[in-house]
Image (tube, helix red, strand yellow):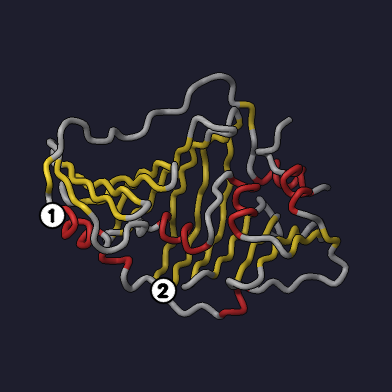
Amino acid sequence: MTARAWLTGLLCVLAAGAGCAARGPARPAGPPTDDPAAVTALAAATAHCRPLRTATGEIRLSGRAGRDRLRARLLAGFAEPSSLRLEALAPFGAPGLILASDGSATTVLFPRERQVLRGSTVPALLDALTGLALDADELRRLLFGCLAGDGGRGRAYGGGWQVVDAGETRAFLRDGALVAADYRGWQIDYALPEGGVPRQVRVRRGPGPVALDLTAVVGDLSLNTDIDPRAFVLDVPSDAVPITLDDLRRASPLAPR
């Protein structure tokens, strides 16, 4: 079975028809007023971000890319500053795909097909697989509501809304809770917080070459536990056949068909 067949099967791509994606939560409207307290409120809502060193969990991914529906179950591990491991689980047996990066070397392995891709970057690989061109640190901060840094300009709107602009990020709070962010053209919505950490993250982008609307639900989350650095380096079988990033792009369900 080829890499394209595995990606298609793992992501369960189905014809989506011409329907529109559901709307996301509203953003505040109307004239704002300056609100320095919004910066303090954001710092309190993201207090979990300061000590966040590592994270592991299971991610159930669903949504749309263009006219296709995508669905996958991933095991994920993150470690500062830029280590990442993602395993796309198949219904039975070995993972269908493993992506690992220790910040200096990045590898994608199709264990069942014994195909391997080396020498690319995390943003290029995630763009080919999901349409999200994020590096490992950005993906970790996006998933756990940690995109906004310290400081910024705060404003208040009616209905309990506060907004903080900090660098490339616009963070939205409602009644003191982080509920959304805009980052580099993506709209992110946060829900189902536990201990201040969102367990549901929706990422939208559109219109564009491929409109995206993906939702990640995080379960079995463990924060700040020690992870063996060897988890972010793949042991590739000696007989694995090399493929290229172009091969992966052509195999991806996001490729034009």
**Image coords of residue 39 (percent x, y):** 19, 57
Three-letter code, disc 2 = Arg
Image quadrant containing the C terminus: top right
Q: Residue at x 25, y 65 (%)?
A: 47
Three-letter code, disc 1 = Pro
Sequence-first tag of 2 and 1: 1
Q: Which mark is residue 161?
A: none
Whole-angstrom CA distance, mark 2 to mark 1, is 29 Å
Query: Image quarter for residue 238?
Result: bottom right
Q: Is residue 229 left or right of residue 54?
A: right
Q: Residue at x 42, y 55 (%)?
A: 143
Query: Image quarter for residue 11?
Result: top right
Q: Residue at x 45, y 68 (%)?
A: 55
Q: Residue at x 78, y 55 (%)?
A: 244
**Image coords of residue 72 (percent x, y):** 58, 47
Query: Image quarter for residue 96?
Result: bottom right
Q: Is residue 75 above or below residue 231?
A: above
**Image coords of residue 94 (percent x, y):** 71, 60
**Image coords of residue 116 (percent x, y):** 78, 61
Could you tell me which secondary element the residue under label 1 belongs to? loop
User: Residue under circle 1?
Assistant: 36
User: Residue under circle 2?
Assistant: 53
Could you tell me which secondary element the residue under label 2 belongs to? loop
Residue extending furthest toward the top: 18
Q: Is residue 184 left or right of residue 242?
A: left
Label 1 Cα crowd, 10 Å radius (few <14 / some 14-19 / many 20+): some
